[in-house]
């Protein structure tokens, strides 16, 4: 059974948390989308295409970290690992 708030401030908090959840999910999905594209390019051996996606990866990771969808250390770790993998091709 879903709890429905009665107090006005609780209703507002529910609206805020639903909105933030949607935004956070969108930011995480954007990051995952770029990672998936890079992973596909690496698997097919297309180094140049994968290298061109690295700025998009950094942008998506930094945006997600800036808005607290992910931790800043996770953003750094994701960028570092994928840059290392692309460089190793």
Image (cartoon, rainbow, N blue to C red):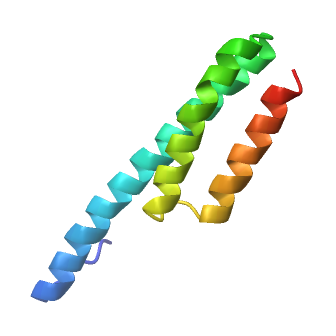
Task: Name the one closer to the observer, 75 or 39.
Answer: 75
Residue found at x 79% / y 43%? 81
Within the image, what quadrant is residue 9 found in? Answer: bottom left
Residue 20 x, y percent position in the rendering? 33, 62
Within the image, what quadrant is residue 47 found in? Answer: top right
* Total marks in image: 0
Q: Measured along the vertical axis of the image, is residue 57 above or below residue 50?
A: below
Q: Is residue 4 visible?
A: no
Residue found at x 76% / y 36%? 83
Residue 64 x, y percent position in the rendering? 49, 54
Residue 31 x, y percent position in the rendering? 54, 41
Within the image, what quadrant is residue 52 found in? Answer: top right
Residue found at x 46% / y 51%? 63
| Residue at the extreme left of the image, as rendered | 8
Q: Measured along the vertical axis of the image, is residue 62 above or below residue 41?
A: below
Q: Is residue 67 visible?
A: yes
Residue found at x 80% / y 11%? 45
Residue 77 x, y percent position in the rendering? 73, 53
20 horizontally vs 12: left or right: right
Task: Name the one closer to the observer, 51 or 75.
Answer: 51
Q: Quadrant of the C terminus?
A: top right
44 horizontally vs 54: left or right: right
75 horizontally vs 9: left or right: right
Q: Quadrant of the N terminus?
A: bottom left
């Amino acid at each position: 059974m879903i709890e429905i708030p009665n107090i006005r401030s609780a209703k507002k908090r529910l609206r805020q948390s639903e909105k933030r959840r949607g935004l956070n999910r969108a930011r995480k999905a954007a990051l995952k989308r770029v990672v998936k594209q890079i992973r596909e390019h690496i698997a097919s051996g297309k180094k140049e295409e994968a290298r061109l996606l690295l700025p998009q990866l950094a942008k998506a990771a930094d945006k997600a970290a800036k808005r607290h969808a992910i931790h800043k250390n996770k953003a750094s770790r994701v960028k570092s690992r994928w840059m290392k993998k692309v460089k190793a091709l």
